[in-house]
Image (tube, grey):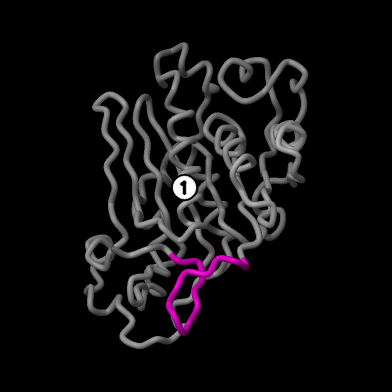
Amino acid sequence: MYRIALAWNGKTLEVDNSRLAAIIVVGCGGTGGFVADGLARLLPQGISLVLIDMDTVEERNLNRQSFTAADVGLFKSEALAKRLAGKYQRPIQYSVLPVGAGDLPRGIIVGCVDNGPARQAIADHLHDGQWLVDSGNGRNFGQVLLGNSTTEKLRPSFIADLCCRLPLPAIQQPAILAQVPRRRSCAEAVAADEQGPTINQAMGALVVEVVRRIIEGTCPWMQLYLDLDAGTLTPTMATPEAVSRLTGIRPSRLIEKERRKTCQGTS
């Protein structure tokens, strides 16, 4: 079984994420709010948590997202950062600028946006090799996709039992870039029966578990598909064969034969 590695010890080939600087959550609405709360609770103090969202809290958000009446009119990232900082007694940074207004911080990017243009903006501003955990959902289903590389930079991707490069989420599922911005809020989507009442919480918990395992060095997945109606969670393991099916690159060309650092990612 391969394990996703942000970085590793070149001699022992053990995962070493000690230099991971930050987790950056882009999108603080439905799923993003639950992700931010879970990460604020679980992240080691040495890893910064950064929240990015330029939207403001509206009354229609209150019964579905992690906000109160006192937050109405505030930026979502600001309101959430201040509340979680007090709740968990840790500093939490936030930005109210759109992605693209400046460089993204270095670290793992967690995308919790719900449309193609926002996903494209994130992809356009990633640092080379920077890991992106992208989440998305429909009524009672959702997916989490992990990746950090364009197709031409995937060779090699695997060394020993470590996976250091995977295709970016938009390469794995190009359709996520075609999703149009949602006109309804999550609350309105629930009222219209377009979205189940617990899918955001379920996806939030799944994303937090993925990030926790990446940091721990025990994450074996490149994709996770959740179906609440069927009661199933279906993984795609990070393997040369799985990457080959997506890209057409032969599995043998994705495997590093020597202990070099040519497939080192960026954290």
Task: State whether the magenta stretch is mostly helix, strand or loop.
Answer: loop
Residue 244 pos. (x, y %): 24, 66
Answer whether residue 15 is magenta in the image. Answer: yes
Q: What residue appears at the point 50 percent right and 55 percent down from the top-left corner? A: 132
Q: Is residue 244 above or below residue 230?
A: below
The residue nearer to you, when weighing 136 against 82, is 82
Res 102 quadrant in image: bottom right
Q: Quadrant of the C terminus?
A: bottom right
Q: What residue appears at the point 62 percent right and 25 percent down from the top-left corner? A: 66
Q: What residue appears at the point 67 percent right and 40 percent down from the top-left corner? A: 53
Amino acid at the residue labelled 1: Asp
Q: Is residue 200 above or below residue 126?
A: above
Residue 186 pos. (x, y %): 52, 23
Res 54 quadrant in image: top right
- Residue occupying the far top of the picture: 191
Q: In screen coordinates, is 71 left or right of 259?
A: right
Give SS at disc 1.
strand
Return the residue at label 1. Answer: 134
Res 150 quadrant in image: bottom left
Q: Is residue 231 above or below residue 91?
A: above
Q: Quadrant of the N terminus?
A: bottom left
Q: Is residue 124 above or below residue 14?
A: above
Answer whether residue 33 is magenta in the image. Answer: no
Q: In screen coordinates, is 55 left or right of 217?
A: right
Q: What residue appears at the point 29 percent right and 38 percent down from the top-left corner? A: 233
Q: In screen coordinates, is 25 left or right of 146?
A: right
Callout 1 environment at 10 Å: few (<14), some (14 to 19), or many (20+)? many
Residue 239 pos. (x, y %): 28, 64
The residue nearer to you, when weighing 53 against 257, is 257
Q: From which residue to which does the magenta span run?
A: 5-19
Residue 90 pos. (x, y %): 75, 44
